[in-house]
Amino acid sequence: MSESQAEPTAEQLVEELRKVKVTDMLVHTSSMFASLAYGKLAPETRDLGDARLAIDALRALVPLLPETERKDVQQVVTNLQLAYADAAAAKPE
């Protein structure tokens, strides 16, 4: 195995984590929660409980986001809430 394919050491992982900005992680986590929520609302994988939890988690992150990201993520939350309401109102097939 070449050096570039070797598993990183604990020290290397710690050093990389030190470089990460918390605001970047908040934005990344917001994106992950949004993707999860949309996936849980899809008819073929619908899980309204998980969708609600992902939406609530995303909503909780909005005030912590950098101001430049806040408006866009709030719009995503609104869209997810509307999609959730539609999915909850839909009759099971």
Image (spheres, helix red, strand yellow):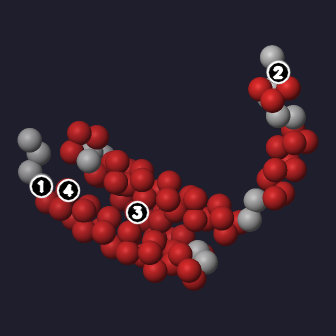
Q: Secondary structure at mark 3?
A: helix
In the drawing, what numbered circle is on residue 90? 1
Label 4 vs label 2, nearer the camera: 2
Label 1 vs 3, first from the N-terminus: 3
| Near-viewer residue (7 or 58) | 7
Whether pointer 4 and pointer 2 mark residues with C-beta atoms closer than 8 Å, the reply is no
Q: Which residue is mark 3?
A: 55
Instruction: Tell me, yes or no, whether the two marked residues, 1 and 4, touch with CB atoms within 8 Å.
Output: yes
Do the numbered discs 1 and 3 sit on residues whose CB atoms are within 8 Å?
no
Point out the frontmost of discs 3 and 2: 2
Looking at this rendering, what residue extends furthest in the top direction? 1
Q: Position of residue 40 (x, y in %)?
A: 33, 48
What amino acid type is highlighted by mark number 1? Ala
Q: Which residue is mark 2?
A: 2
Sooner in the amino-acid sequence: mark 4 or mark 2: 2
Q: Is residue 49 visible?
A: no
- Nearer-N-terminus badge (2/1): 2
Residue that appears at 43% across and 59% down: 34
